[in-house]
Every structure is written in structure tokens, then in C-alpha cells.
Amino acid sequence: MDRFAAIETFVAVVETGSFSAAARRLKVGQPAVSKSVANLEDRLGARLLLRGNRQLTTTETGRAYYSYARRALDEAEEAEQAARGSAIALTGSIRICAAVTFARLHVVPQLKGFLAAHPGLSIDVMLDDRNVDLVEEGIDVALRMGELPDSVMTARRIGQSRRLVVATPAYLALAGTPQSPDDLVAHQAVVYDRGGGGSAWQFRKEGREASVTLSGRLRVTAAEGLRAAVLSDMGLAVVSEWMFAPELADGRVVDVLPEWALPPMDLWAMYPSGRRASAKARAFVDHVQAALAAGVGTSAP
């Protein structure tokens, strides 16, 4: 195999997780894949993969090499499409990552339209509330909310949602409806104990400010758990409007202090460090941004 083919083979092995799966993707024999990667390692004078009995693991050098190799393949594909005058026709695959609840409510329902617009494209969706390593996981673009977790990554803000205090009508019927932020201290709160959450909040209204620290017997680290607790009438919570968009629309939860503002929640498209976004990644992000801009509680910057 030539040098470019060896790079393509190595990328396929990393992204599929095995020599056999890479061989199926590339439609070649497994021995050819193994030999190509071994020759690449010999030429580079570095070990890229650790070969175990049941799995392959990229070395630190392998992860760094993969990042540059993936970028080279993406740019080569874009150059070929541009030369053919078919840059709009996206082909191949794209691997995305997003938080479970946000993706379930606002990303996965939009994939049908995106795939219909690009019939030559396939999508691998990784749902995870953690900030995963984009290079190690082979992610083309991740959607993350809140403060930027890593300033060295390439990032683009694509949306913004209001934060609200929400509760079910049943909970408010028993505990009473707060009339001001100060009233919240007397209520049971379900605290979202992850980035973008917490118990201390700053409210604003017509030039006035109020600092409140919520208290409650339940803290959760995943949005699905927070949703379940609130919908089970266990207390009120400070959340992004994205998190309860369906329930706010049909009245299963209500905005408790609509006249008071909280810091908004930003949504970022994150790309692996040092890597230019591919045309496929940019098209996907544009699609999500347009959908959010047209949806409840969102605005495009």
C-alpha cells in the first residue's frame, strides 16, 4: 500500500477498534490491514497501537497521529469533492457526541432530515454526559453546554437557552408557589451536580439582584435523573429550557419565577484540538443550529 493508503488503513483500525472490522470497512483482507499498520509503525519508528488478546489500544503517539491523519483524510476528501464540483454532496461517515438528554430531545429528532438531505452520509452518535476525549474516541464534533471545558479546542457557539426555575403543578400545590428568589430557600430543590449546574444562583430583575443557595435532599449527576425527580414531584430545579422543553410546552412543568432572569446556558460545537472542521461536521452543526434557532427557548448567536 502507498503512504496515503496506509494512513487510511490506520484511521480505519482506530475508528472501528479492530483489524478485522477495518478490513470489512476497506473491503480488503485482514492480513493486508495488519501488514499496512506494521509497515507504518516501522516507517515512523513509533508504536501506534497496543495489541491485546481482545482489543486494540492507541498509544499516546497513536492518538496524536490519528488526529493529524483524520484531518488529512478529511481535507483530501474535501479537495476531491471541490475538484469535481460536488462539495455539497457529502459522503462517508461522521461521528458526533452529545449529552444524553439534550441529544434525545433536540438532536436525534433532527437526524432524519439531515440524513435525507445527504443520502451518501452516515452518522455514528455517541451519547455521553461526560466530556469525553474527542481524539481518543474519534469524534468529529461534540455538542457541549455551559462553560468551555477546554480552551485549546476549536469551539463555536451555536445556541443559547434561558435558565428557569421549574416545578410540577402537583409539587407547587403542596409546597406553595415562590413569589421571589428568596422564597426558594424554603423549598426542596433537586440539584443538578454537574458542569452548568449547582446550588448557588444569581437572579436579576429590572436592575435588582438576588443571590440564592438552594437546598434539598437530592443531588443528581445526570439530566435524565433530574428530569425524573422533578416529574415525580420531588422538588423544584434550576435548568435550561432545553431540558424540559416538551413538558413546558404541555404544562407538565411550569416556569416558577418568569419575571426573574438567570444566566443563560450556551451550547458549543467542539472540534478536536488542532483540527479543522470537515465539511460534514460543519453541515451537521449548521443543521442543529438552524433547528435550535427555530425551537422553543433557543436563540442563535
Image: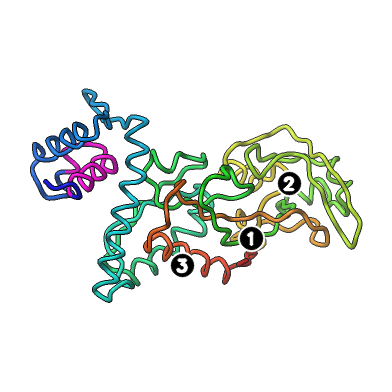
What secondary structure is found at the residue carrying circle 3? helix
* Cα–Cα gap, marks 3 and 1: 15 Å
Q: Residue at x 26, y 42 (%)?
A: 16
Q: Residue at x 51, y 55 (%)?
A: 269
The quadrant in which residue 226 appears is top right
Amino acid beneath label 3: His
Q: Nearer the viewer, residue 203 or 73?
A: 73
Residue on which the image places disc 2:
236
What secondary structure is found at the residue carrying circle 2? loop
The quadrant in which residue 160 appears is bottom right
Q: Kindly report which numbered mark, 2 or 3, lies closer to the viewer in this rendering.
A: 3
Q: Which mark is residue 160?
A: 1
Helix, strand or loop: magenta stretch: helix
Q: How far across and down, in percent of the image, does residue 12 sit?
A: 24, 45
Amino acid beneath label 1: Gln
What secondary structure is found at the residue carrying circle 1? strand
Judged left or right of residue 126, residue 56 is: left
Q: How far across and down, in percent of the image, does residue 234 sit?
A: 69, 41
Does residue 300 sit above or below 49 in this rendering?
below
Outermost residue toward the bottom?
85
Q: Nearer the viewer, residue 38 or 30?
A: 38
Residue on which the image places disc 3:
287
Q: Which residues are magenta?
A: 5-22
